[in-house]
Image: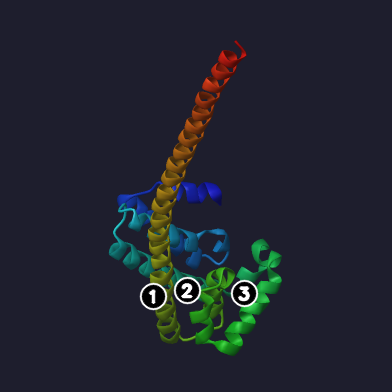
Amino acid sequence: MHSITAWLSGLSGPVGYAVVAGLVLVEDALFFSFVVPGETAAVLGGFLAHQGRLSLGWLVLFVVCAAVLGDTAGYEIGRHIGPRILDTRPMRRHATRVDRAQELIRHRGPAAVFFGRFVAFFRAMVPTLAGMSRMPYRRFLLFNALGGVLWGVGFTLLGYFAGAAYTRVESTVGRVLALAIAAGVVIALAVWYLRRHRRGTRAPDRSDRSDRSE
């Protein structure tokens, strides 16, 4: 994960938009893609937008569209492939979480589509399970779009404002460090001056004592 985030932090321009949107879309579209850092990509994209390497407006548009389209793809996969998905090895490893997601779909329906967007595992699984449960697509699309807009705008702005806060902290730390260095220099000069002054006052005393002894 660290290597992926380090790679993302160096992107800019069209490649940056494509990579961020692609990670968001893949995380939402594929039922086993809870290992894909779509949420991290949206936050880092916002950070890059604050640095001026991406446009915030275009980035938000791409992230929201990728989120909505990714969930739609996940819905269609669940609708056409059906329960066979649950027999795959990744799903067997997460059987407890899958059961919780299915329970959420059965009892909450469209609300699960909306709120599932904000939980990493559910974000990948709920669209597929919604398709498997034959939830009407129009109902799914409405709550999918609402969740996608709120999630996409929210996490992209989170990265943007985190970048602004980082810049302020960085500049503040720079000023504090400069003041600390300046204070250190002043203190060092004061200590040097006092020591020199003491040595200067001791020298005449020694000469006076030698004169008196004669």
Q: Residue at x 34, y 57 (%)?
A: 50
CB atoms of marks 3 and 1 within 8 Å: no
Residue on which the image places disc 1 = 149
Residue on which the image places disc 2 = 76
Q: Nearest to the eye among marks 3 and 1: give it.
A: 1
Callout 3 environment at 10 Å: few (<14), some (14 to 19), or many (20+)? Answer: some
Q: Quadrant of residue 93?
A: bottom right
Q: Residue at x 46, y 46 (%)?
A: 7
- Tell me the amino acid under the disc marked 3: Pro
Residue on which the image places disc 3 = 83
Q: CA distance from mark 2 to mark 1?
A: 20 Å
User: Helix, strand or loop at disc 2?
Assistant: helix
- Tell me the amino acid under the disc marked 1: Val
In the rendered image, the vertical position of residue 105 relative to residue 40, given as above or below: below
Q: Residue at x 67, y 62 (%)?
A: 89
In-front residue for pair 33/183 = 183
Q: CA distance from mark 3 to mark 1?
A: 29 Å
Residue 132 image position (x, y, % from top left): 56, 79
Identify the image quadrant of the C terminus: top right
Q: Earlier in the sequence, mark 2 or mark 1?
A: 2
Residue 15 is left or right of residue 124, and the answer is left
Residue 72 image position (x, y, % from top left): 44, 73
Residue 57: tell me if it is visible.
Answer: yes
User: Helix, strand or loop at disc 1?
Assistant: helix
In the rendered image, the vertical position of residue 97 relative to residue 160, given as above or below: below
Q: Earlier in the sequence, mark 3 or mark 1?
A: 3
